[in-house]
Structure formats: C-alpha cells, structure tokens
Image: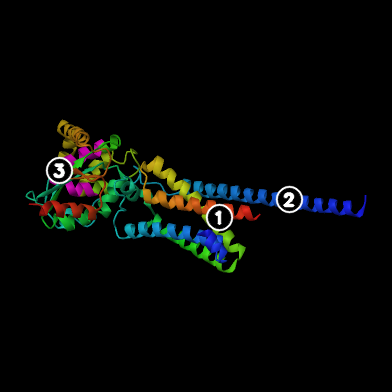
C-alpha cells in the first residue's frame, strides 16, 4: 500500500468516525428530548393526582356569609327575579347549580351586571333552571324552588353555589340541602315539604323542557329579550342592554 | 425576507424564535388582562372561550393560567434575544428546554379543553400552536446543527 492509499484510508476512517459521532449526538439529543417529555408528563401526573380534591359530601355545608345577598347587591328581588318588573330588558339566566362555570360566572360577572344594568332600572334578571348534570342538579333546583316559596331564592342561590363540590358526589343530598336551608334562615319543615312536593318536581321538569325549547344547550347561558348570548361577559351584556333599553 | 437579512448578515435563528415568542406573549397578555380585569375573552362567532375562561381550570392558586403564559413567553423571548446577541449555546438550550416544558403543559390544557371542559378557546389554541411551532423550530435548529 503506497502513501497515497494510506492517506485516503485514514481520511475515510476519520470521516466515518465524525459521522458516527454526529449520529451518536443526534441519538443523544432525541433521547434527552424524549426523556424531557416523559419527565414533564410524569411531573404533571403527580401534580394532578396529588392536587386537593373539590369539597365533597364529607365537608359540613356552609351558611351564607355577610347577611342577605340581595341587600348586598342593593336591588329588589321578587321570587327568582332581580330588579324592577317594569324594566324594559329581561336577562334570562339558565344555570345548573352543579356547573362550575355557572358558579364562576356568578362570582365574576353577575355583580357587574347587577351594578350596571339592574340597579339602573334598565334590566331585570330572571333565573331559570337547566338542571342537566345529574341527580344532584335536579335536587338542588328543587331546593331552590322550595326556598323561593319562602322568598329566599337568591340567598339560597348564594348558599348553594358556596357549597358546590364534586359533580354528583352527594354534595346536594337532601339532608345537606335541608341543612343549607336552615343556615340560610328558612323554615326547615316547610322547606322539607316543598323540596319533595310534586309542584317542585314539576317546576324543574317544566324549566328543563323550556330550556330545550329555547335552544339552551349549555350552562351558563344568557338570553336577553330572546337573544341567546351564550356565557356572555358583563360588558357584552351591558352593550346589548343599552342598545335595547334605548331603542324606541 | 430571511434571504435579505442573510445577505446583510443580520439573520439569526434566534430572531425567528423571538418573533414567535412575541406572538405568544401578545396572546397571553390579552388573555391575562381580560382575566385580571374580570372580563371574558372575545371570540366573535366562535364559541368556547367563555366556557374555558369560566372553568375551574382557568386559574391555578387563584392566578389565571394566562399569567403563567406571559411569564413563560417573556422568559423565552429574553432567552431568544440574548442568544441572538451573544451566541451562547446554553441560552438556546434553556429556550429549548422551556419550550419543551411549555408543550407538555399545553398538551395537558388541550386535554382539559377537549375532554373535561368540552369547549375549545381559540385564543388558547392559538397560544398552544405558537408554543408548538416554537418548539418545532427550536428542535429543527438544534437537530440541524448536530
């Protein structure tokens, strides 16, 4: 083998070694990326599994905080209607007491809607049941109807949402609903009777039927003078109310 | 445009990453400002933003998840710009690792949207796509340089 052949072979071997090194680097890079993905997923799974659970039926129900919610809002209430019955615009709320988005909507948007549109006399809010998430939803809706019979609909509404927990976990069991009624200041015996009455069952069934006839298929849904706005924000509602209340 | 920048010697892959990070940052900023001001994101005719924004998963320890998105995008942007300016490979590696973590979390949030909340927010999807593209670009840059 002459000098030239030896040199070519060395160069080839060198190139081969460089290529092998590059391939090894690529394999290591892919391995680290895969390992990173798996590690991230493992951390995520541990975090999800060890996250604190939503309150269930084991936690005693809480009563309302800070007195009557209607008084805090500073508007009038008649049954499940908030605001003046003569208001030109009607805001229909369709909710399920088990739906977390309804609770969140009530916490983040409802106070602003009341302050902007109900207190001004431009609109009134009417609560409607669309109890579709399971037996706890239906029981809670009947309980709210029973509270309405004693003139405490909105206070009981606030108590129900304050006690919302894991879906269909029994968080709205009969005994707990009665305890919530007692904490809200309702007459317990009358509440129990109304809760289990045929009239309550019928009212909830009728409301669910009406939801479907109105085209409501999720909660919360805001319907203003018949116009479905889905889960609209307080600002969107305000714009529509201003438009409708100033229309000739 | 890339060719024009290349000719002038201004092109650097860090610049592309920075542009993508800036897009992600703007989306996360919009969602954060909306959440912190008590509003809901506007999705126009597309539905789902409200449901996602109102779900219990939209906040972690009371902080809107979009705020974490702002933190992530801002960090990524700073890393991309710093890499562009001083070529330190560790800055790019940190960008790569962070965008990988972002992709994992985005995968989890997409799962929540599709199977738990059962609603898709277009803004969140846009942020997710921007994260995925950023990771894809960073992956390609690294792989090509090996």
Asked whether the viewer can see residue A185, the reply is no
Gap between marks 3 and 2 measured at Cα: 79 Å
Q: Nearer the viewer, mark 3 or mark 1?
A: 1
Q: Residue at x 56, y 68 (%)?
A: B85
The spot of residue A109 in percent (x, y) is 25, 54
Q: CA distance from mark 2 to mark 1?
A: 22 Å
Mark nearer the N terminus (3 vs 2): 2
Image: A235 above or below B48:
below
Q: Which residues are magenta?
A: A138-158
Q: Badge 2: how crowded within 10 Å, few (<14), some, or many (20+)?
A: few
Residue situated in front as seen by the camera: B30 or A101? B30
- Residue tagged 2: A19
| Dot 2: chain letter | A
Give SS at disc 2.
Answer: helix
Can you tell which quarter of the image residue A56 is in? top left
State the SS at label 3. helix
Residue A139 belongs to magenta span = yes
Q: Position of residue A129 (x, y in %)?
A: 21, 39
SS at badge 1: helix
- Nearer-the-camera pick, A227 or B112: A227
- Residue A170 seen in the figure: yes
Label of residue A148 in the image: 3
Residue B113 drawn at (x, y percent) = 39, 44
Query: What main secondary structure does the magenta stretch of the protein show?
Result: helix
For image coordinates 41% across by 51% down, the residue present is B126
Q: Given the image, what chain letter belongs to the residue carrying mark 1?
A: B
| Residue position marked by numbered label 1 in the rendering | B138
**Same chain for the residues under marks 3 and 2 in the image:** yes
């Amino acid at each position: 083998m002459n000098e030239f052949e030896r040199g070519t072979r060395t160069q080839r071997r060198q190139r081969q070694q460089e290529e092998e090194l590059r391939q090894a680097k690529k394999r290591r890079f892919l391995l680290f990326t895969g390992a990173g993905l798996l590690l991230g997923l493992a951390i995520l799974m541990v975090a999800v599994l060890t996250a604190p659970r939503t309150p269930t039926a084991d936690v005693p129900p809480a009563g309302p905080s800070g007195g009557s919610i209607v008084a805090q809002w500073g508007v009038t209430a008649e049954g499940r209607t908030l605001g003046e019955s003569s208001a030109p615009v009607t805001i229909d709320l369709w909710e399920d007491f088990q739906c977390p988005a309804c609770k969140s909507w009530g916490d983040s948007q409802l106070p602003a809607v009341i302050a902007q549109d109900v207190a001004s006399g431009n609109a009134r809010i009417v609560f409607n049941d669309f109890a579709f998430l399971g037996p706890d939803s239906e029981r809670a809706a009947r309980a709210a109807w029973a509270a309405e019979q004693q003139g405490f609909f909105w206070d009981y509404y606030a108590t129900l949402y304050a006690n919302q927990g894991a879906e269909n976990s029994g968080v709205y069991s009969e005994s707990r609903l009665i305890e919530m009624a007692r904490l809200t200041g309702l007459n317990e015996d009358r509440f129990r009777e109304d809760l289990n009455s045929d009239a309550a069952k019928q009212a909830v069934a009728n409301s669910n039927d009406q939801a479907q006839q109105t085209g409501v298929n999720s909660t919360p849904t805001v319907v203003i003078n018949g116009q479905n706005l889905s889960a609209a924000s307080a600002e969107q509602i305000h714009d529509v109310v201003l438009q409708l209340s100033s229309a000739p | 445009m890339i060719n024009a920048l290349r000719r002038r010697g201004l092109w650097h892959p860090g610049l592309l990453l920075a542009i993508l990070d800036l897009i992600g940052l703007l989306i996360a900023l919009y969602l954060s400002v909306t959440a912190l001001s008590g509003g809901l994101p506007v999705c126009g005719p597309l539905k789902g933003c409200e449901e996602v924004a109102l779900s219990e998963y939209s906040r972690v320890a009371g902080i809107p998840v979009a705020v974490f998105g702002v933190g992530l995008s801002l960090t990524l942007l700073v890393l991309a710009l710093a890499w562009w300016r001083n070529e330190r490979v560790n800055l790019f590696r940190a960008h790569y690792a962070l965008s990988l973590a972002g992709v994992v979390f985005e995968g989890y949030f997409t799962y929540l949207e599709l199977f738990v909340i059962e609603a898709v927010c277009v803004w969140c999807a846009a942020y997710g796509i921007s994260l995925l593209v950023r990771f894809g670009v960073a992956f390609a840059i690294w792989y090509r340089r090996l």
